[in-house]
Amino acid sequence: MQKIDTALRPHGSSVGRCVAMTCYLVDMADFAAFNEAYNRWFPPQVVTPTRTCVAVLALPHPDMRVEITAIAGLPERDEGPGTSD
């Protein structure tokens, strides 16, 4: 989650602006520990992004156990004159 937050910060966003996450776990036996770490960033009592957890056979690096794809909102910005929606 920290890596996601760090990647979003230069764009004026943060992990707190995530609206959806897809989480890939090599071993679903790791889900309880993953969920505990996830809940430190997104406590269950607050609005959280939608989440899908998928078991996968492997990830690109042999030491990787989890990979996360996140979709986050960006702050609105003034596009200036001459732009359209």
Image (cartoon, rainbow, N blue to C red):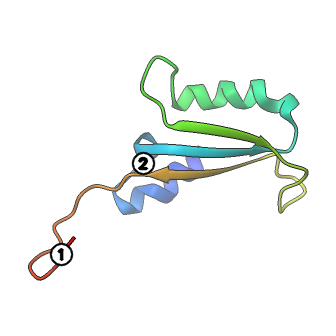
Q: Residue furthest front?
A: 85
Residue 68 location in percent, x, y?
Answer: 66, 49
Q: Is residue 12 left or right of residue 33?
A: left
Pick the quarter of the image with the N terminus: top right
Residue marked by disc 2: 14
Mark 1 is on which residue type? Answer: Ser
Q: Is residue 77 left or right of residue 82?
A: right
Mark 2 is on which residue type? Answer: Ser
Residue marked by disc 1: 84
Count neighbours of disc 1 (C-alpha within 10 A) and say few if under 14, some if 14 to 19, many if 20 or more: few
> Could you tell me how far apart the alpha carbons at marks 2 and 1 are, in whole angstroms?
26 Å
Helix, strand, or loop for circle 1? loop
Residue 33 location in percent, x, y?
Answer: 75, 27
Tally the numbered discs: 2
What residue is drawn where x is 88% and y is 38%?
A: 27
Pick the quarter of the image with the C terminus: bottom left
Residue 31 location in percent, x, y?
Answer: 78, 29
Circles 2 and 1, Cβ within 8 Å, touching? The answer is no
Residue 20 location in percent, x, y?
Answer: 52, 44
Helix, strand, or loop for circle 2? loop
Say if 39 sits above or below 81 in the image.
Answer: above
Could you say which disc has been placed on residue 42 in the image? none
Count neighbours of disc 2 (C-alpha within 10 A) and say few if under 14, some if 14 to 19, many if 20 or more: some
What residue is drawn where x is 12% and y is 82%?
A: 82
